[in-house]
Image (cartoon, rainbow, N blue to C red):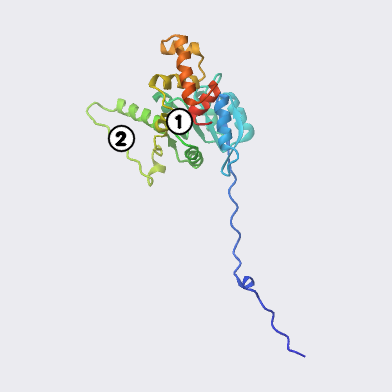
Amino acid sequence: MRPSQPPRHSHSDLRPEFPPPAPAPPPLRLLVADDNPVVRAGLTALLTGRPDTTVVAEAGDGREAYEAAVQHRPDVILLDVRMPGVDGISALPHLVGLAPVMMLTYSHETETVREALRLGAGGYLVHGEFTTEQLVRAVRDVREGRPHVTPGAAKALLLDLRRDAPAHTTPQPPVVSEDSAPSTLSHMQPSMGQSFRSRFRLSTREAEIMDLIASGMTNQQIAAACFISEKTVKNHINRIFAKLHSTTRSQATAKWLGVA
């Protein structure tokens, strides 16, 4: 009889056993609160289906946002400022106890920005001043307690600080580095709004009117706000639509807000 041979081991049998890679963390669950259905749809389309974010609920005003937050318990709430009924600033104190809140809005008035941050908002993003990836990073950081403020809002705060500073002092702009960013007021994002919108080549007046369209104003309201006739408003809108390659207010708004 032939002596038995020791079993042969393949190279794969001799490899050390490593633990399997850790599973990817679940996507952040977001609530989008904005009275503009085009904005809500655009944000939902951008943030749902990604591996790191998903929209679990939408709301059209502050009251709906509170009810949705109680029901769905999102990780972060994206909240507009101007909404009918209960607006974002009024709802903010009730929402921050449920989840971190990121203001995501078209409003960058100084008082609004300051009040939102005072009431507990974890960040303040102005439409047109961020890319999708910057928005996702901001949401993730706000969830971890690191605030974000886009340039339009940061400028409003800086002007406010300068206005309140004693007359004999010369206020210096803040210096922000990547290493110190988590402990500062914000990550100073690149000024996306100016470069993003400049590609549409709208005049100053056309950009002003497009802002008003995006805020939901009618032609009559825009005419009153700009002290021009409705016919002039219509002429501006026709030129705006041509430059934005849009045929409806919804399409133009989506492109202008960067959610198309």
Residue at which label 1 appears: 128
Name the spot of residue 164 as percent of width and height, x first.
31, 26
Q: Is residue 176 above or below residue 251?
A: below
In the rendering, which numbered label is found on residue 145? Answer: none
Q: Residue at x 44, y 37 (%)?
A: 148
Query: What residue occupies the far bottom of the structure in this picture?
Result: 1
- Residue 202 vs residue 41, the one in the foreground: 202
Identify which amino acid the numbered label 1 is placed on: Gly
Residue at which label 2 appears: 173
Name the spot of residue 56 as percent of width and height, x first.
62, 35
Marks 2 and 1, Cα distance to the nearest angstrom?
Answer: 23 Å
Q: Residue at x 61, y 67 (%)?
A: 17
Would residue 195 appear left or right of 55 to someone viewing this image?
left
Q: Residue at x 42, y 13 (%)?
A: 226
Would residue 134 appear left or right of 72 to someone viewing this image?
left
Q: Secondary structure at mark 2?
A: loop
In which quadrant will I find the N terminus?
A: bottom right
Name the spot of residue 168 as percent of width and height, x first.
22, 28
Name the spot of residue 29 as percent of width and height, x first.
59, 38
Circle nearer the viewer, 2 or 1? 1
Tag 2: Cα neighbours inside 10 Å, few (<14), some, or many (≥20)?
A: few
Identify which amino acid the numbered label 2 is placed on: Pro
Q: Earlier in the sequence, mark 2 or mark 1?
A: 1
Q: Is residue 55 above or below residue 177?
A: above
